[in-house]
Image: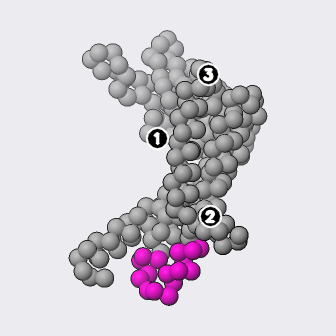
Amino acid sequence: MIKRTYNFLCSLDLSFWLLTLIMVVMGAASFLLREGSAINEIALFKWIAQSPASETWWVWTVLALLAVLAVNTVFCSADTIISRISKGGILRLIAPQLMHAGFLLVATAHLVSAIGGEKEGGQIIQGMTVQLPDSSSLRFDSIKVATGMYGMPTEYSAKITHISQTGTKQAEISPNHPWFTGRYGLYLKNVENGNPPMGVVELHAEPGASAALAGGILFTAGNLLLLFYRRGREEGGW
């Protein structure tokens, strides 16, 4: 019984079935959820707490499947190390483990952000001052937008002043250049060239961001090592 359970948890078929079920559930949810859901506007677990079970069932289902997939990944890694550690080939042994570690780190990072993250947004007007969650203030000194020949925006930015107990700092934000203070990041999402100019901003706190980056690096490194190993075998060098 124990051996059968171990073999089941190590099975590659289990991984494929879990991934398939995750995609099916998420695909079904995208068609069944009502319009106007705030899932993209706030942190995931805050959305779950504010939404009825009829809208959140698929999140719990996906989390349960991901939990089993994480266990399957750990068992696969352990089985690979046990079975191959005495057969040599360091790249062949390490590459899959880096990929597995990267996946587990990314999954954990997203879970941490879903539980402890924050996400707020809204419209701002040139000259407007807003209060940040850390009790400091943010003033939007100017909002600029450049338009193309057809009237569509081609470039936009906002100059801001951050006022806190430690002093005053100025910065400029644009779509690809957010501004960070402490655990928060401010992103400029859109601008309208009115009188006065207006824009839309989002304030994010992602406690799992660093772990997600590290996981992505590990996963990429594992893939590259595996490709390097297979290329070496094809060329007869291994």
Estimate the spatial distance between the alpha carbons at disc 3 and disc 1, rounded to whole Å.
Answer: 33 Å
Q: Which residue is mark 2?
A: 9
144 falls in the magenta region: no
* The one of 77 and 109 positioned closer to us in this rendering: 77
Q: Is residue 22 above or below residue 67?
A: above
Report the label total. 3
Magenta span of residues: 78-93
- Give the residue displayed 51% in from the left and 54% down from the top: 16
The quadrant holding residue 47 is top right
Which residue reaches farthest front? 1
Q: Is residue 81 above or below residue 118?
A: below
Q: Residues within 10 Å of mark 1 (few under 14, many from 20)?
A: few
* The one of 30 and 109 positioned closer to us in this rendering: 30
Picture quarter with the N terminus: bottom right
Asked if marks 2 and 1 touch (Cβ < 8 Å), the reply is no
Q: Earlier in the sequence, mark 2 or mark 3?
A: 2
Q: Nearer the viewer, mark 2 or mark 3?
A: 2
Q: Secondary structure at mark 3?
A: loop
Q: Residues within 10 Å of mark 3 (few under 14, many from 20)?
A: few
Q: Residues within 10 Å of mark 2 (few under 14, many from 20)?
A: many
Q: Is residue 164 above or below residue 142?
A: below
Q: Which residue is mark 1?
A: 177
Q: Which residue is mark 3?
A: 34
The quadrant holding residue 48 is top right
Say what amino acid the circle numbered 3 marks. Arg
Say what amino acid the circle numbered 2 marks. Leu
